[in-house]
């Protein structure tokens, strides 16, 4: 190549610039071009648009479509496209729905014929101990605080009597218990001995007021049980729990919704009937309660049912006219079935204390109570009312309620109660 010709050409284009500078400039340009080429080659190519994105884009762009039959534009809300999994998972079988009233306490096995063992819950004594926790803490705890290492003198006996009275045992019963303890003072010398003697004396009182469970008396069919009590003691709930106990024992039960005055009383009893698997006879609101009881007994006779539980409206024990209506229900039942009702169960609220005793006395005088159900023992720290009722009334204490569950309504056992109390 003739470099002299190139040099002359450059001199003619740009006079006064040395050829060396021309060469340096060209080299710089070449280097810049090479650098740009390398950068372009290192840049990753643009990824192809994913099919899912493309379909979603198409959905968004084509959100408005045309109805070719009518020739009008209509906006159609289409659901967003979901990504398609590479390997679709097998569909899971839905669990069967269980209604609250039918929900079992222990989970059943998914496979037919395979059952899981239900968790062991607290037994009857465990439930009783738990329900009497407040009473035991107050009563037994006070015994330990008052008589721990103390000599049983006259002042100590006065403190014991005061403790028994404040536990809702009642003045007369507390006085008698204190006299019995004083008579046996030579049998103990410390608080443990006092607890032993007191436990024996209380058990002797409780054993005077016991009754066999009604379901053991299978001679009469149907056996009619009339449930009474003042407002708010838990009559309807107690009837529902009794119905569940009877059906669990293999008895057929029919409920009579004779509380026709309280709002939603019949609906509440109907829910309990469904839970317990019992039948129910009900009339319209405001109907004659005696007519409902009569029809229920008649239906039980026709269907061969074992137990009839008659719910009644709450009655203030001080209202003579309301008590007379309960007597009318008794007479009406007896017209259909002689000697019925076979039991008249009085429901008392343990939290009302000594007022429960006055209620029981007046109901017994008016109706001839054959048994007592004492509810809400778990809600009071003065469960000594049980001792007062057993000592004062000549009526068996049939049931006690120590919680909200069906199993928390228990047949009264004096030995078990005394053990749980101490």
Image: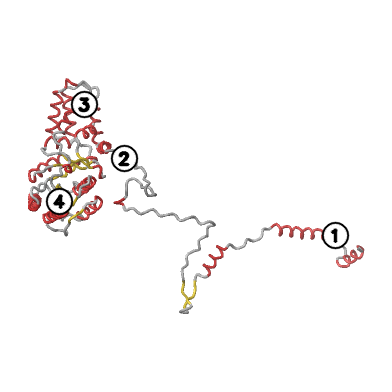
Q: Which residue is mark 1?
A: 23
Q: Position of residue 317 (x, y in %)?
A: 11, 46
Q: Tag 1, which secondary structure?
A: helix
Q: Which residue is identified by label 4?
A: 312
Q: From the image, tell me which residue sits under label 3.
A: 196
Question: What SS does tag 4 mark?
Answer: loop
Q: Nearer the viewer, mark 2 or mark 1?
A: 2
Instruction: For marks 3 and 4, give the CA distance.
Output: 42 Å
CA neighbours of label 1 inside 10 A, class few (<14), some (14 to 19), many (20+): few
The foreground one among 419 and 80 is 419
Q: Position of residue 124 (x, y in %)?
A: 26, 38
Disc 3: CA contacts within 10 A as few (<14), some (14-19) or many (>=20): few
Element assignment for label 2? loop
Residue 329 position (above or below residue 69): above
- Relative vertical location of residue 298 with respect to residue 137 in this rendering, above or below: below
Give the residue number, with chain letter if any, for mark 2: 121
Describe residue 412's horizontal placement relative to residue 322 as left or right.
right
Sequence order check: which comes first, mark 1 or mark 4? Answer: 1
First reached walking from the N terminus: tag 4 or tag 2: 2
**Contact, CB < 8 Å: mark 3 with mark 4?**
no
The residue depicted at 21 percent of the width and 35 percent of the height is: 417
Which is more toward the observer, 229 or 304? 304
Q: Nearer the viewer, mark 3 or mark 1?
A: 3
Q: Residue furthest front?
A: 113
């Amino acid at each position: 190549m003739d470099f002299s010709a190139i040099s002359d050409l450059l001199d003619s284009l740009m006079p006064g610039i040395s050829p060396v500078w021309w060469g340096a400039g060209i080299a710089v340009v070449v280097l810049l071009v090479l650098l740009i080429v390398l950068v372009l080659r290192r840049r990753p190519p643009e990824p192809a648009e994913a099919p899912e994105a493309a379909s979603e884009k198409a959905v968004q762009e084509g959100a408005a479509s045309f109805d070719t039959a009518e020739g009008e534009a209509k906006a159609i809300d289409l659901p967003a496209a979901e990504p398609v999994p590479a390997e679709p998972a097998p569909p899971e079988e839905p669990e069967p729905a269980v209604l609250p009233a039918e929900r079992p306490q222990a989970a059943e096995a998914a496979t037919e014929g395979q059952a899981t063992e239900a968790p062991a819950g607290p037994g009857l004594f465990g439930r009783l101990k738990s329900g009497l926790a407040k009473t035991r803490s107050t009563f037994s705890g006070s015994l330990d605080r008052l008589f721990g290492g103390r000599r049983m003198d006259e002042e100590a006996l006065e403190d014991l009597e005061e403790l028994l009275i404040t536990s809702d045992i009642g003045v007369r019963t507390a006085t008698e218990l204190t006299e019995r303890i004083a008579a046996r003072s030579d049998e103990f010398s410390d608080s443990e001995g006092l607890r032993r003697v007191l436990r024996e004396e209380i058990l002797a009182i409780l054993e005077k007021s016991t009754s066999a469970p009604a379901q053991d008396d299978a001679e009469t069919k149907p056996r009619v049980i009339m449930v009474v009590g003042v407002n708010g003691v838990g009559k309807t709930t107690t009837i529902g729990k009794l119905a569940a106990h009877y059906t669990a024992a293999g008895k057929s039960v029919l409920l009579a919704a004779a509380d026709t005055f309280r709002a939603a009383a019949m609906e509440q009893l109907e829910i309990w009937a469904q839970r317990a698997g019992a039948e129910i006879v009900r009339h319209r609101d405001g109907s004659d309660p005696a007519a409902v009881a009569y029809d229920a007994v008649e239906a039980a006779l026709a269907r061969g049912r074992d137990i009839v539980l008659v719910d009644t409206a709450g009655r203030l024990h001080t209202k003579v006219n309301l008590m007379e209506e309960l007597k009318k229900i008794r007479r009406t039942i007896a017209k259909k079935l002689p000697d019925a009702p076979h039991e008249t169960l009085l429901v008392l609220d343990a939290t009302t204390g000594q007022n429960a005793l006055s209620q029981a006395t007046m109901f017994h005088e008016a109706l001839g109570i054959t048994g007592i159900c004492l509810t809400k023992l778990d809600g009071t720290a003065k469960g000594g009312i049980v001792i007062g009722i057993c000592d004062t009334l000549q009526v068996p204490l049939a049931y006690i309620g120590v919680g909200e569950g069906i199993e928390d309504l228990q047949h009264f056992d004096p030995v078990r109660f005394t053990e749980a109390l101490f």
